[in-house]
Amino acid sequence: MKAALLDRYGGNDAIRIADIPAPSIGASDLGVEVRAASVNPLDVKIRSGQVKVVLKYRLPLVMGNDLSGVVTQVGANVRRFRVGDEIYARLDKDRIGAFAQFAAVRESDAALKPANVTFEQAASLPLVALTAWQALVEIGNVQPGQRVLIHAGSGGVGSIAIQLAHHLGATVLTTVGQRNIELVRRLGADVAIDYRASRFEDLARDCDLVLDSAGGETLVRSFACVKRGGVVVSIGSTPSAAFARQWGMNPLLVFAIGLMSRKVTAAARARGARYEYLFMHPDGEQLARIAQRVEAGTLVPLVTPPVQRGRVLATENVFIGASNELGAFESGVAGQLLGVTGAVALGGVATLVVVVLWWVLFPALRDVNRFSDVAAPALPTSEP
Ligand SMILES: NC(=O)c1ccc[n+]([C@@H]2O[C@H](COP(=O)([O-])OP(=O)(O)OC[C@H]3O[C@@H](n4cnc5c(N)ncnc54)[C@H](OP(=O)(O)O)[C@@H]3O)[C@@H](O)[C@H]2O)c1
């Protein structure tokens, strides 16, 4: 099969398309023919080696965390799926490999794909929707009437988190760039704060939960927004010492992370609030619950607009193309791309450059123009 292999940590040139054997599947695995895979900021961090302290991969590595596809094989112990089922999954962090024609997917990490969305839309969901679910439901237990602040509401995680918090009955506040204010309102945000024009802590007070995706100063300042007894969940750059311990990091690293996060710990203590660092995990049952909400129209996947996907696919080497896009994201250009194209297609999610693998890997179907036919989904406008 064809797969996108990372030979060494680095830039785009570290990735090549190679012919390798399809992965063998274990007794609890599904063999899946990949139909679509999405690119997340995590893929960039893996490519560059930024997360190699926590994610220790042996290279060469087949890239890709999120996929949708069709089950072609089932292991002897598999009970919930059959050959022919259409599924979606976030692969286990130790067994990634979505940027390939076939992938081995642990049964417990997969769920049936929501029936009302395309493979591309389904592939855009697992990592970001599970992150939102785990922050708001698993950690936050968000209840109707609570106040929730979601940073970066127009991003991959934020755009789903807004919809989920709204669905849970919370009052949703969000930080967003000016050009995406209309988008986040349509997603269900009650208060949209332009983070360049205002200090969010002056406008977002007494929140029960804050979801931070930036870390650093944004995370520290977020404690001013949370009420006593509330929680700040961060998926950004500052893990907690408790997280490091839980992940079995060596005591020196735990100590170092404790030192690095001392400002955050102090801010939490001063506020009488909880601080939780989340590194999302795959979970097929949660994905099944997310699929129900997608089918009910409560959660709508947003996919990077056609123009950008066209650009990705127009390159000869799709994976390098995708990485180029992500290189831009790292330097903040993504917001601009998003703003311009978002106006055309109901906004976009900068991280979710959907790479339609089977189009890429089967040249006969490689017709970039067909992407411009992909319509932006209708967004939920009222309580389900
Ligand atoms: N720990 C985990 O398990 C986990 C899981 C998922 C993601 N993450 C991490 O979380 C981060 C966000 O992921 P994502 O997929 O949502 O990224 P994304 O789609 O690239 O979203 C980034 C968004 O951030 C907004 N933004 C930039 N600066 C901001 C600021 N100062 N305040 C508020 N918003 C700002 C931009 O919105 P505008 O265009 O509106 O300005 C942009 O759309 C990434 O670093 C990712 O690696 C971690």
Image (cartoon, rainbow, N blue to C red):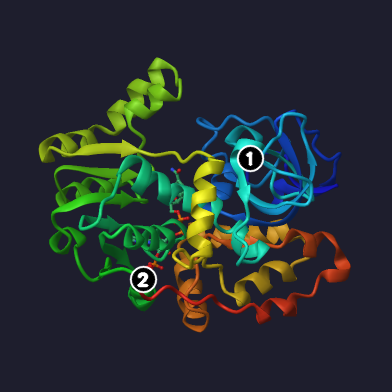
Q: Along the line of sight, which residue is nearer the eye, 55 or 291? A: 291
**What residue is shown with label 1?**
9
Ligand 1 quadrant in view: bottom left
- Amino acid beneath label 2: Val
Question: Is residue 130 placed above or below 270 in the rendered structure?
Answer: below
Q: Viewer-nearest of labels 2 and 1?
A: 2
**What residue is shown with label 2?**
184
| Residue 58 found in image quarter | top right
Question: Is residue 361 placed above or below 61 in the rendered structure?
Answer: below
| Residue 186 found in image quarter | bottom left
Question: Of helix, strand and loop, which one carries label 2?
Answer: helix
N-terminal of the two: label 2 or label 1? 1
* Crowd tier of the residue under label 2, counting other residues whose Cα lies within 10 Å: few below 14, some 14–19, many 20 or above: many
Residue drawn where x is 48% and y is 72% of the image: 338
Cβ at disc 2 under 8 Å from ligand 1? yes
Find residue 40 and report its horizontal and vertical position in percent: 55, 53
- Amino acid beneath label 1: Tyr
Find residue 377 and report its horizontal and vertical position in percent: 53, 75
* Crowd tier of the residue under label 1, counting other residues whose Cα lies within 10 Å: few below 14, some 14–19, many 20 or above: some
Residue drawn where x is 57% and y is 49% of the image: 44
Find residue 243 and report its horizontal and vertical position in percent: 37, 29
Q: Is residue 152 visible?
A: no
Residue drawn where x is 50% and y is 38% of the image: 281
- Left/right placement of residue 181 relative to residue 351 reads left
Question: Is residue 51 placed above or below 369 in the rendered structure?
Answer: above
